[in-house]
Amino acid sequence: MPPPEPVIIGHATLYLGDCLELLELLPALRGVDAVVTDPPYGIGYVHNGGGRGLVSGKTNLRPIHGDDRPFDPAPWLAVAGDKPILLWCADHYKTRLPASGRFLCWDKSCGQGAADNFVDAEFAWTNRKNARCIYRHFWKGAMRAGEDAPSRSGRVHPSQKPVELMRWCLDVARVGLGKTVLDPYMGGGSTGVACVTSGRKFVGVEIDPDYFAIACRRIEAAQR
Ligand SMILES: C[S@@+](CC[C@H](N)C(=O)[O-])C[C@H]1O[C@@H](n2cnc3c(N)ncnc32)[C@H](O)[C@@H]1O
């Protein structure tokens, strides 16, 4: 089977498809300089608003593709090798990660703690050693700071990460300017926007056509 044609937007190359299949079809994916991604976590999350992420089957809302089974980071650890890799929500699959490296914390309540049902922190893992490991950026349901505030680009994906957070990730993982970053689970494209607005090249893959279209639109707007 031939690989699908990518959508190329400036320094971003975007594929609609299954990243594990593409990894077999496109040897070039293994040549990227870094892997920065926010995969399905294997928790069966279905967005239901109000901070009450419910398990699949309890609502009519669309579940995240692949979230119904444990995430295996092995293929992406192999792609990265000694190069930078940063994986979000790594606490859900920490037993499948190397013992080395370190955890990073996104403090979503900005030091206020949890006074409601919303998750107040998320954790990533990286193979880079770095003194910085906490990032504060307010994000509570639809209430959001920065570029993704409702008055700007707003809410595009149930597991959306702030663009500012993803730019911080690129710096913490020490991804050099001009380097190429792979996000095999790009969702609404926050990693791609962070790359093209900070001087990095980007390769993204998304299996869901609706999220893929949103990522294309956001990355194109960011590049303009
Ligand atoms: C946690 S979300 C990423 C959200 C993203 N960080 C953002 O800010 O919008 C994971 C994404 O991976 C996609 N996905 C799941 N399995 C996939 C696969 N095998 N290949 C490509 N994309 C996949 C899902 O459709 C979902 O959009």
Image: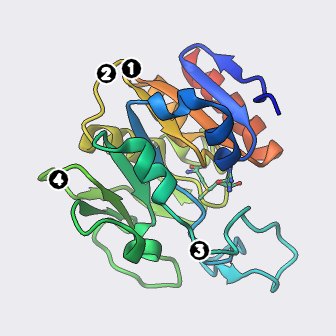
Residue bearing mark 1: 199
Residue bearing mark 3: 70
Marks 1 and 2 close (CB-CB < 8 Å)? yes
Amino acid type, label 4: Arg
Residue bearing mark 4: 132
Nearer the observer: mark 4 or 2; the answer is 2
State the separation of the CA atoms marked 1 and 4.
21 Å
**In this rendering, would 171 be left or right of 94?**
left
Q: Is residue 19 above or below residue 196?
A: below
Residue nearest the observer in this picture, 190 or 90: 90
State the separation of the CA atoms marked 3 and 1.
33 Å
Q: Is residue 31 above or below residue 65?
A: above
Q: Residue 139: horizontal and vertical position, in percent?
A: 47, 61
Q: Residue 49: horizontal and vertical position, in percent?
A: 68, 73
Residue bearing mark 2: 177
Q: Which circle's residue, 4 or 2, is located before the other in the chain?
A: 4
Amino acid type, label 2: Leu
